Image: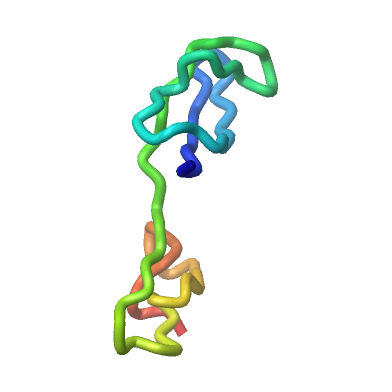
Amino acid sequence: MPLYEFRCKKCDQVFERLCRSGANGKGLACPACGSRGLRRLMSVFSARVSGERGSSAASGASCSTCSSGNCANCH
């Protein structure tokens, strides 16, 4: 099951949940305020590319120099 990130429309809390693929947050409630008004967010992910061992972009290392926090220019 994939890990999805959600934002509460009422209190703006962001949290993650394991959900079935394609789930849109039905049945979930905000852990901070209990609201069921949630929006699924697009998350940043890291993938290992064949032949790029040790590359910080492939290993998921993060930095503060780019907006996503994870780019090929880090380290």
Q: Relative to 52, does residue 36 appear above or below in the rendering?
A: above
> Camera-side residue: 1 or 74?
1
Q: Position of residue 50 (x, y in %)?
A: 30, 82
Q: Relative to 44, does residue 42 appear above or below in the rendering?
A: above
Q: Position of residue 33 (x, y in %)?
A: 67, 15
Q: Is residue 73 left or right of residue 5?
A: left
Q: In which quadrant of the rendered view does residue 48 lie?
A: bottom left
What is the count of numbered marks?
0
Q: Relative to 57, does residue 15 appear above or below in the rendering?
A: above
Instruction: Name the residue: 69% across, 21% down.
Output: 32
Q: Is residue 65 left or right of residue 8?
A: left
> Camera-side residue: 44 or 49?
49
Instruction: Name the residue: 50% across, 33% down.
Output: 19
Q: Position of residue 65 (x, y in %)?
A: 43, 70
Q: Relative to 58, does residue 16 appear above or below in the rendering?
A: above
Q: In which quadrant of the rendered view does residue 52 lie?
A: bottom left
